[in-house]
Image (cartoon, helix red, strand yellow):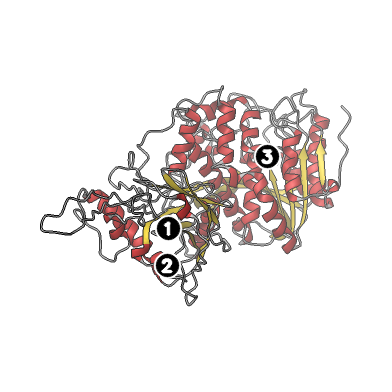
Amino acid sequence: MTKLSPLSANLARPRAPLWIPVALGITAARCGGGEEPPPTPEVKVTTVLITPSDPCSANTPTPTDLFFDASGAPETLGCTLPTDPVEAAVTLAQRHDGAPVTSEVRIPLTGTLNPLTLSSTAAFSLEPGGAAGDLPTAVLMQHVGTGTAGWSLVDASVTYDGTAVRMRPTRPLAYATTYVAVLTRAPKDTETPPGRLGQSKATEALVGSTAIAAGRYEGLDAEGAARLERMRAALAPALEVLAQASPPVTGADIASIHAFTTELGDQHLKGAVDTYFTAIDDGRYTYTQTNRVVPFSEVYPGLPAVVWEGLGEIRAGTLKAPKLLDEQGHLRPDWGTRSETIDIPFTLTIPSRVNRYGVALFIPGFGRGALDGRALGPVLGDSAGTAVLTIDLRCHGARSPGADGVCGEDRNAQEVAELTDDHANNGNPEINGADGIPDASGAGFFPGDPRALRDSQIAAIIEIIHVLEALRHGGLFEAPVDINLNQIHVVAQGHAAPAAVGAVDHVSFPLTTLTLQTPSGGAGYKDLILGGPEDEKTAFMASAPAGITAANLSNYLDRLQDTLLKPLDVDAWGDSLQVKLRLTGTRTRMLMNTGRVTQYVSQTARTNLKDALGLDANHVSQHNGACDDFFIFTCTLGDNPAWLEEAKGQIASFISSGGVTFSPPAP
């Protein structure tokens, strides 16, 4: 077993996936002697298998970027999937994303190798100017940066299983990074007499400098030539580095060379955040908004004026935001440069008797919408001098699913009014009659399609960042008094909590006082989908891939959490958010509901975020779990007014007090 030289691995920015497999050739040798020399048996030289023509049946080194087209799209999407529906859904989603970071490199051969010749103690460095020596057996390189700079070696073991050479990295690879795997001609095959690995015509073309065209060698068609040419161009920087290494590895020394790009992982979100701020800086998106003053009687129909004491006025409107998703719920590849927008509906309750106020950004969960800010507005305005800005995320409130089951992005007022609202108040006892929030609010927030599920969470995070950044640009909400950016609070209900925490982790300005109020906070997406309301689960299953049923749903969500959703789970925010909060001197407090174990999300799941953030026990308040249907608006045990008031009081006190603990009220 050979161990490749270790060098530090660094995470790269996402780059277009490009890949190369290696080909093999067959050579013949003849012996001379006499006028009629006897025929000499043909010696079949071991070479690397590579068939660049068919992405579904090609026998090539894997993983590979060979079958990504010129635009970076995978050509293997139409290939046969695993028969198990869970694995089929995950496999199809990952084909868009590149190689898993747990990949090992497999290089198939036409013949057999002498395993003893695969062992090597040769010293090798990518730095030029070192002493000459024997060729290394194999090299695995990582590219961080652009051009010929930023290459480093990756520590891996090299083994041979009788049919292929395998390179096994000793640790997971980096997300969104290009790797180049090289098998040199140092190992020998088992022919008599033994010889070094042969170099195929395809390999000769890949390591050369001439563009590859159809007919370059026998059997190479136009499509295969185009794939090899893309790979040849992508490998040129790596070949330049290898040629200057110590000892040098020239094109003639290479039996196999190919490139592969790893899955984007957390770079999906980080790349979206970078794209967002670049688009803002370039003026492609702005914080344009419109609003109007809404009469108190319109917001609190049929209720006495005492209800809105502490409020100066209420405004309602929309904020323009980037449109990230296409009709299938997937990220649009050009959303950062093609300025399509959506409207985020909001309500803003403004306290009276203060000239400068903090803002609590309230992000409703299932069954809720922007109008629900009215339940918090008076109590926060009166006791904490805090405005409440409530928004409709995708599939919530005015953006709820319509009759066609699709979450609308640009509905007009009449279309919103026509959305279903059969229940009198969605469990909110303060409002008599229809509350204006469609009863399907929140359904469809979790699409069943794995890529759409991931991308919708990224879109939600970007929308919340956009709202927070709009607050930073004071006065954009046309409020009559100033916003105190040193008092920003984030209140996220239920399944909106992970997106809210992710947005806080990536917002550009320091949040010097941050109050995270996250009922169901800390729960992963599996907990939220399996433990959430039945309508939410029904909507999820309606858009799930073929073959996903109630029987394999848990397994399906486990696989998604291990793959596409892992970088978006709340545990992922822990370390980075802790560092950010410490650097900015933020006082972090958290209010959580205990929850009923038999319904929605367990207390164990909710403590994940607290633990990830490293919050002390005296910075976490817990509400009565008997009254906990996704926060403050409804209690299944009779809508007990005392418990509802206690819940609202805890929010107000928690924001204004610095994070004291509370005892739950007696039942």
State the image coordinates of residue 412 (x, y, percent, origin top left).
47, 40
The residues bearing labels 3 and 2 have C-alpha atoms spaced at a distance of 54 Å
Q: Are marks 3 and 2 in contact (CB under 8 Å)?
A: no
Q: Is residue 297 visible?
A: no
Q: Is 91 situated above or below 516?
A: above
Q: Is 218 situated above or below 9?
A: above
- Which residue occupies the foreground of this view, 537 or 321? 537
The residues bearing labels 2 and 1 have C-alpha atoms spaced at a distance of 10 Å
Q: Where, by quadrant of the figure, is residue 517 drawn?
A: top right
- Which residue occupies the foreground of this view, 13 or 436? 13
Q: Earlier in the sequence, mark 3 or mark 2?
A: 2
State the image coordinates of residue 654 (x, y, percent, origin top left).
81, 47
User: What residue is pinned by disc 1?
Assistant: 182
Q: Secondary structure at mark 2?
A: helix
Q: Which-is-in-front pick, marks 3 and 1?
A: 1
Residue, x 13% and y 59% (percent of image)?
34
User: What residue is pinned by disc 2?
Assistant: 242
State the image coordinates of residue 440 (x, y, percent, origin top left).
56, 30
- Which residue occupies the foreground of this view, 42 or 291? 42
Q: How many marks?
A: 3
The residues bearing labels 3 and 1 have C-alpha atoms spaced at a distance of 51 Å
Q: Which-is-in-front pick, marks 3 and 2?
A: 2
Q: Are marks 2 and 1 in contact (CB under 8 Å)?
A: yes
- Judge from the rendering whether residue 594 lies leftward or rightward of residue 530; answer left or right: right
Residue, x 59% and y 52% (percent of image)?
171
Q: Is 118 situated above or below 123?
A: above
Residue 118 numbered tag: none
User: What residue is pinned by disc 3?
Assistant: 493
Residue that lies at the very extreme toward the bottom in this rendered image: 129
Residue, x 23% and y 55% (percent of image)?
29
The residue under label 3 is which amino acid type?
A: Gln
